[in-house]
Amino acid sequence: MMKVYYYHMVPVKFYYEDWKAGKIPGHLLYGLTHLSQYGVECIYHAFPFNPYLHKWKLMFYNLWKILFCSQRYDAVYAVTHTGLELLIFMRTLGLFRKPIVIWHHTAVVVPENCIRRWGSTLFYKGIDKMFFFSESLLLESLKTKKLKKENAIVVHWGADLAFYDRLIAKRQTSSHFISTGRENRDLITLISAFNQLTESCDIYTTRSGGRVCDYELLVQKEIGLLKENIHFHIVDSTHLEMAEKTNNAFAVLISCLDFPYTVGLTSLVEALALGLPILSTDNPTFPFDVEKEEVGIKIAYGDVNGWVEAVRCLSEHPEFAKSFGKKARALAEKIYNLDQCTSEIAKVLLSLKR
């Protein structure tokens, strides 16, 4: 049995309990729920404060917590490197002897400042294995020459199918299009498109997300009064509540701003698991092309007319929508699912112990 120190910036114990209770999908824990099936046991990291509010406190706390952990472990497995910077630099200098494996959510970049560039080079030497969500992110990262090809791995991050199967069994399909998610969503383009349509659109998001400080104020400023077919909601809902609403929709909308990472990926894999057709911004960092896989239609960034045409296409050709949905679920079952993801993670972790 291999043991890893598992690092995530969410309350892991509570998330795990919620997963067992069927309240959240397991993929939000990046393999934690299934790693034991492959002989990998996890030590949970915990915070006595909000890790998002105290940058330096977070780094020193994590360093102390991991260095002086009372349990033996073989490696550190982290969902993000945020808060582990000091530990990673210690690994670079040979002062920390355990391998470090992290998920890198963007492509590695080269800072313009020469001092930061030097520090960045040292930093990445302290990471033994790095997981990426897509081939495009990995290839861009390799161009920086800060990591070795053998240490960079694309993992097929996919949905917890068992969680979504329970919802599908209770499905009550509607004709509504739905958009969920909060991070860097292009709601202005989406709403502008539905202003030209009669189809019903339900939008659920939080007050802020990513670079957007207040979605409600932004919509009021840029759009004003919404048409009756557009239902805009600022919510603080659970993962289960949002998944239940998505489950009953006609199609999933993923309209994103242009950022160099997989904006909208959680909504994407959820749509696959639910077997729903997808209309999505053409994010080149996604792990697959929705049109090549025949699971939906992609639209260029900021293209209002593109969204109008895509929505009309699905509405006027429901047989296309049904075909997209079937192929979406098949793709989830074949590649983008929690079991496949966990097996790929476990393979890398176990190779470090050997």
Image (cartoon, helix red, strand yellow):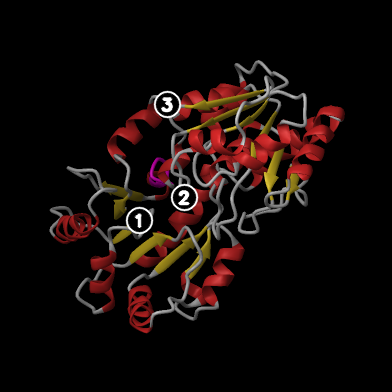
Image coordinates of residue 270 in percent, x first then y, are 58, 37
Task: Tell me if residue 32 is in the magenta stretch.
Answer: yes
Image coordinates of residue 14 in percent, x first then y, are 30, 33
At 70% from the left and 18% from the top, the residue drawn is 174
Q: Earlier in the sequence, mark 2 or mark 1?
A: 1
Q: Is residue 326 left or right of residue 346?
A: right
Q: Is residue 296 left or right of residue 80?
A: right
Q: Earlier in the sequence, mark 3 or mark 1?
A: 3
Task: Tell me if residue 328 is in the magenta stretch.
Answer: no
Between the C-alphas of marks 3 and 1, the distance is 23 Å
Between the C-alphas of marks 2 and 1, the distance is 24 Å
Q: Earlier in the sequence, mark 2 or mark 3?
A: 3
Q: Which residue is the site of mark 1?
A: 78
At 38% from the left and 84% from the top, the residue drawn is 114
For the residue marked with disc 2, what is the amino acid?
Arg
Q: Which residue is the site of mark 2?
A: 211
Q: Which is nearer the eye, 127 or 228?
A: 228
For the residue marked with disc 1, what is the amino acid?
Ala
| The C terminus sits in image quarter | bottom left
Q: Which is nearer the eye, 135 or 245?
A: 245
Look at the image and give the residue range highlighted in magenta: 31-35
Circle 2 or circle 1, nearest the eye: 2
Q: Is residue 282 above or below residue 226?
A: below
- Judged from the image, the secondary structure of the residue bearing numbered disc 2 is loop
- Judged from the image, the secondary structure of the residue bearing numbered disc 1 is strand
- Judged from the image, the secondary structure of the residue bearing numbered disc 3 is loop
